[in-house]
Amino acid sequence: MDKALPKRKRLPHHHGIDRLNNPIIHFLTVCTKNRQPVLATDSMHQLLRAAWTAADSFVVGRYVIMPDHLHLFCSPIETKPTYLEAWVRYWKSLVTQKHSTGVAGKLWQRDFWDTQMRHSEHYATQWEYMRSNPVDKKLVENPDDWPFQGEMSPCGWDN
């Protein structure tokens, strides 16, 4: 008798694990609801940066904003457990409130993907994936030409 596994309603988001004085760095992918292509604009770029600044329990390192999703590195400000899920929910709500459509709760996909970086090589691999994303989607020919990317604060392995 083979029982079906229960369906997961939400993604698990684990607390950062302190790895012997290495920084706790998360790689996040956050998508718009129904993959609406509304993020890759100057105004949204500024809204996101302002929201990340206001949501100050984490710092945002390097990021790439695509039309329907974004990737970023973030790191908690304090060493005590900080809830990544609450931080993402907070800055998403800040952006939604200021977004021009004014349709609350309709801008973002409910959840997000996160992975904690284990070492500098893992970080470097994810950064190359992020910065290549606009090239892979044929939005630009050179990753440096994509205008909707940047770095707000160094996150430890940015060197």
Image (cartoon, helix red, strand yellow):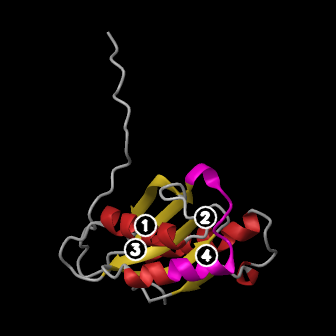
Label 2 secondary element: loop
Q: Quadrant of residue 65?
A: bottom right
Give percent across and percent down for residue 42: 67, 81
Report the magenta stretch's main SS.
helix
Q: Mark 4, mark 2: which one is toward the viewer?
A: 2
Whether residue 87 is situated above or below residue 114 in the rendered picture? below
In the rendered image, which quarter contains the N terminus?
top left
- The residue to which callout 4 is attached is 44
Q: Earlier in the sequence, mark 4 or mark 3?
A: 4
Instruction: Identify which residue, 19 or 140, lies in the foreground.
Output: 140
- The residue to which callout 3 is attached is 119
Query: Is residue 49 visible to us here?
Result: yes
Q: Mark 3, mark 1: which one is toward the viewer?
A: 1
Residue 43 belongs to magenta span = yes
Residue 37 belongs to magenta span = yes
Q: Are marks 2 and 3 in contact (CB under 8 Å)?
A: no
Circle 1 packing at 10 Å, graded few (<14), some (14-19), many (20+), is some
Q: Say the numbered circle drawn on residue 20.
A: none
Q: Please report the bounds of the magenta region as a residue range.
A: 33-49
